Each structure stands twice: as C-alpha cells, then as structure tokens.
Image (cartoon, rainbow, N blue to C red):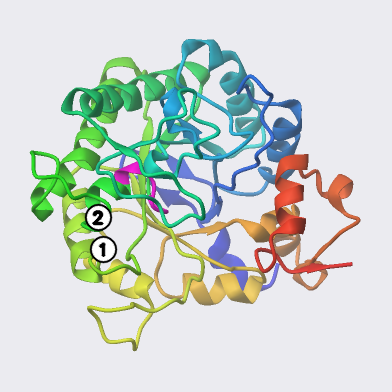
Amino acid sequence: MNSKYASFFESVSLPNGTKLNNRLVLAPMTTMSANPDGTVSDAELAYYERRTGGVGMAITATTYVTPNGIGFPGQFAAYDDSFVPGLTRLAETIKKQGSHGILQIFHAGRQTPEQLSPTGEIVAPSAVASERPDSAVPRELTDEEILSIIHDFGETTRRAIEAGFDGVEIHGANGYLLQQFFSSHSNRREDRWGGSLEKRLRFPLAVIDEVQKVVAKYAKQPFTIGYRFSPEEPETPGITMTETYALIDALKDKNLDYLHVSLNEFWSKPRRGEADTRARIEYILDRVDGKLPVIGVGSIYTADDAAAALNTGVPLLAIGRELIIEPDWVEKIESGREEDIETVITKSSQERLVVPDGLWNAIIHTPGWFPVED
C-alpha cells in the first residue's frame, strides 16, 4: 500500500466504545429495488455483499418508519415487525463482511410521492409543498400524529436491534421530515413544534430521545446512534449556517456516536452566513470541536480525493457513488492497486457491478448523477 493512504486504515473509536476497522464508510444510497411488499430483496442483499468487504462501517439505504413515510419507489420498509426477518438478512449480510452495520431510518414527510402514500395523503409540519416537480400540498400533522411518529422512530430502532444491526442513523437531512421541522421554510407552525429556533428543534431532538430510550431498554451491547443533517438550504427563509451551528450545538449535547454531513460535493462552500474561503465541512468541524466523530461525504472518486478530504481532519469519510462504480475501491487501495480503480460507469456493467435494477435504471436515466459512458 502507498504510504500516503495509510491513514485510511487507521481504526476509529466511537463514543460508545465501538472500534471501527478503518475510516471508510459505505454511504447510504437508495437502491429502489425492494420486493413489492416492502421486504428486502435478494438483489439488495447481493448489492451490499459486494460492497461491504472493505469499509469499516456500512450505512444502508434509508428505510421508512411509518407507512405514509415512504420516499421512493422500491424502498424497503421497517414500520412493522413483519419486516424484521428481511432486515435480519440484511444485517447479517453486512456484518459477515466485517463492517459495522447501520440501518438508516427516516420519514419522508412532504417528499412522499402522492402515488406511494397508502392513503394518497402527504403529511408534513405545515401545508407547504415540496420543491419536487408536481408535489402535492401536504396536510399539516396534528400534535397527536407528531407524537405517534416519534414513537414509530423508536419502534423501528427496536426492530433494528432485534434484526442484529450495530446501530441506526437518524436521517435528518436532504429535506425529509426531521429537516422539514427544523427549517423555517417548511415549518410555519405556531405551536410547540414551530416558530422559534428552539421550537423547530423540538421534533428532531425528541426523535433522538426516543431512539436513545429504546436503545437503553433493548440493546444488550453498545449500539451506535448517528444523525445525518444537511448544513444549509437554498431557500429564504431557510436553514442557514448560523442555524446549522445551533443544530450542531444541540446534537453535541445528545450523547450521539457520530454526525454525518450530507453534501453532494465535499468541498462545497457556504451559501450565506460565512465567508466563502473554506468548505462547509471545515466550518462544521470547527463547531463540533472534536466532541464526536464527523462523517464527511461528497463526490469522492479517487484515492487522492479521499486523502485530500481526510487531510481536513474529518475522522470518517463516506463513499457512495464511487463504491457503486468500483466495488473493490477499498481493497485496491489497500493492496497498492489504486491506479486500477474505475471512476466511470459503463452501460454494459450492471451484472458485473451487482447493481439492482431499480438503482441501475436511475443511474442510467438521471443525467449528471453518475459519470456514465457507453
């Protein structure tokens, strides 16, 4: 192995005492390939088996905690105990490869496609439609429904424990329900769940509390709890870097095991609220101040890309699209074959790369998402 990549393979200890084999993480990427009944498919299991042999931690595609929280076609579910057998197979597949297995959990809120909602109804903090094309105006959640969803996050965590996962990642990023509550753009409420910054924080913090309560009750060994967030929104009003700092400060006080920053580009700079001389991730690392590990992510393709990112001081680095393009990315770097790493996906490579049909179709038909060549 080239010595300049040796730091990739340093172990990392999480606050709960868990030690990860290295600093590399399989990023959560939706596969859109579950069985029609919402259970984990064999194609998904094959996808994870192909990609979890080298990373220290693997985060699954996100799963939804209530029937009306679905976000994508072909998304696997976890809102009922009947899904535990499939989740168990998924946990076993990831862990047998030596990775720390994390189930990402969420509710899509106003980003639930109308045709996928079991009632045809979309729910959200407020009646503000998503920016997605043809999005329906959601119905504002009642106080009782909000409390029920918080409970559902806990129940899904219990199922993750029963299935044998090593932890859960609470998905508070990418404009989904937890972010919707935190954002002044999507949350126009005037009750205890909205209005001031403190009130807009109440829902995500309550979800964390519920998850931690369930872990304390059911987990028999250290169980990792992470939280993913998006640092800014383009809308005004919307989440700014200043509000992101308030979120980070609140999360630092919750005894989490890591924070996961959701970025399309690792080196992207703040839109507003900071000078644009440094990347967002660097401002975030300063604010976290070493209180817990941070996962960085975003358009990391080559070994040199990863080395530059880790040189910022970020403890963990998630690789998403590149581990789809090159499932042996970690192993090739570890064995000194980084020059053999592929960084472009070819349209004839689906079977060789073990990519499920749903994800493959999205890759091929979404311009600009992946570097694709004929």
In the image, is residue 263 above or below residue 192? below
Q: Position of residue 138 (x, y in %)?
A: 35, 40
Task: Please tell me which residue is depicted at 62% across the width and 76% down the height of the picture.
Answer: 304
Q: Which mark is residue 239?
A: 1
Q: What are the residue bounds of the magenta stretch?
A: 173-178
Task: Please tell me which residue is depicted at 87% across the width and 59% down the height of the picture.
Answer: 347
Secondary-structure class at tag 2:
loop
In the image, is residue 89 above or below residue 25? above
Q: Where is residue 134 in the image (x, y as percent from the top left)?
A: 50, 51
* Front in this rendered view, residue 344 or 257: 344
Disc 1 residue type? Ile
Disc 2 residue type? Ser
| Left or right: 360 in relation to 11 | right
CA separation, marks 1 and 2?
6 Å
Quadrant of the image containing the N terminus: bottom right
* Front in this rendered view, residue 285 or 54: 285
Most extreme residue toward the top is: 82
Residues at marks 1 and 2 touching, judged by CB atoms closer than 8 Å: yes
Q: Mark 2 — residue?
A: 183
In the image, is residue 299 above or below residue 66? below
| Left or right: 67 in relation to 353 | left
Dot 1 or dot 2: first in sequence order is: 2
Task: Please tell me which residue is depicted at 44% across the width and 43% down the height of the picture.
Answer: 19
Confirm whether residue 87 shows in the render: yes
Secondary-structure class at tag 1:
loop
- Residue 256 in which image quadrant: top left
Q: Mark 1: few, some, or many residues within 10 Å (few <14, many ≥20)?
A: many
Task: Please tell me which residue is depicted at 49% across the width and 23% down the height of the picture.
Answer: 118
Magenta region, mostly helix, strand or loop?
loop
